[in-house]
Structures are given as structure tokens and as C-alpha cells.
Image (tube, helix red, strand yellow):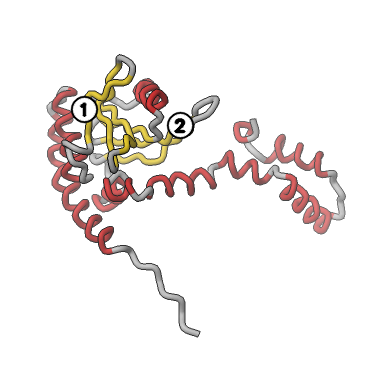
Amino acid sequence: MADAPRSRTPKWETDTRDRLRKVVRSMLKPAAELVARDANEGDTRLFVTDILCDALGYDKYSDLTTEYRVKGEFADYGIRVDQQLSAFVEVKRCTTRLSQRHLRQVEMYAVNEGVEWLILTNGPQWQVYKLIAGLPVTIDLVLEVDLLAEGMTATKAAALFLLLRESFGRGQIEDLWRERAATAPKHLAKVVLSEKVVDEVRKELRRRTGLNVESVELARLLRADVLPPELVV
């Protein structure tokens, strides 16, 4: 029987990754100079626009909306993919440390407009969050990259690739989020405490030790003594 054909990376993706590495490399010096002179927020936005357009492939006229109005407030950028508002970008001064306060600000915009993706940046640093609607709303950090941190340019470009217009439009960052959400500690804790898994653990414990512990008691022991408390709340 012939071996199954190996999956190949599409040519568009290979070519785009190569291009992105070169563009990111060319932007490391401007990013460092931005921080060195403690550039103001307006100059930081110019750099962010270059990243969005030159590196990530968004058209500044058809894909980006600056000062996107949301109930009397203004998001720095709205990103459209195929004419659909898909993300908000909040830009802070290049030397500002990104914080939860900034995240709450852009979260409000996203909730009001039904947008799932939130991006915080100060130019060199980029954080991407997924908003999961519900009561309460939850926010997952999906991607974080610092252009000026130690590490290979290729690694930084690989992270930014998921924000690329072509990649974003194909839902590749959504796929990454789903994979991480499925294997997140809290989700795994729920799997471990599920009735079927606890019953299998009970059977294996009886096989190994001869003890026949009730499933309810075993689940209690797992919660109390095995799993960290923050995962079983």
C-alpha cells in the first residue's frame, strides 16, 4: 500500500512567511528608535500603521478605519476583513506598559460592536485576545509577541503571521485559539473530573491496590488533593 501523501504548506503561505520575515527584520531598527526617543502616541500610531499595512497586508483605505466610533468613544483602529468588522486595535505610547486597564477599554468597544478579536499594541509589543460572549464575558490571551525581545526574527514573524490579512481571513488564529482552549488547564480539569474518567481511574486504582473507592469519594479526593484549587472552582 502506498504511503499517504504528506500535507504540504500552501505556496501562498510559504511565500508570505518569507516576505513577512524580511519585513519584520526591516522594522526592528525603527521600533528600537521609537522607544529610544520615547515617541509620543501619534508617532507610535504611524509605526503601527506601517506594521498593519506593510507587514500584515491590510489596505489602509478599505481594511482599516481609524478612530472607529463606539457609543461616544473611539477605538484607535477597526480592522475589516472582507468588509466584515473583525477586530479592534488599541494603540498606546511606545514606552507604555500594556495593562489590564487598556484591555478593559478595548473590551468595551468589542462587546458593544459584537467583535471577537482585540489587539493591544505599543508598537514593538503586540497582544491578541479572543472575546467569548456570555455572562460573564471572558477574554483569552491567544498571541503575544515583542519585536524587541531576545529571540529569532523568524519566531516573531511566525507569531505575527496569524495576524496577517490572509491568515486572519482564513481563521487560522481561531484554529489556534480552539486548540489552546481545548487543552487549557481548566478544561482538562473538567475532563479529569468527568464521570467517565473518574470511573476509569476507580477501576485502575482497584486493579493496582485492591481498594474499591466510590466514584464520589474519588472525585472529592481529586478536587481536594490532586488538582490545584483554582482549576476546580
Residue located 65% across and 39% down the image: 227
Q: Residue flagged by tag 1: what amino acid is it?
A: Thr
The answer to whether any part of residue 148 appears in the image is yes
The residue that label 2 is drawn on is 139
Q: Amino acid at mark 2?
A: Ile
Q: For residue 63, which quarter of the picture?
A: top left
The image quadrant of residue 214 is top right
Judging depth in this view, the residue of 201 and 135 nearest the camera is: 135
Residue 96 x/y as whole percent: 26, 24
Q: Which mark is residue 66?
A: 1
Q: Which quadrant of the figure contains the C terminus? A: top right
Residue lying at the far front in this picture: please name it: 83
Mark 2, other Cα within 10 Å: few <14 / some 14–19 / many ≥20: some
Spatial separation of the CA atoms under disc 1 and disc 2? 23 Å
Q: How many marks can you see? A: 2
Quarter of the image where one finds residue 53: top left
- Residue at point 27% right, 46% down? 164
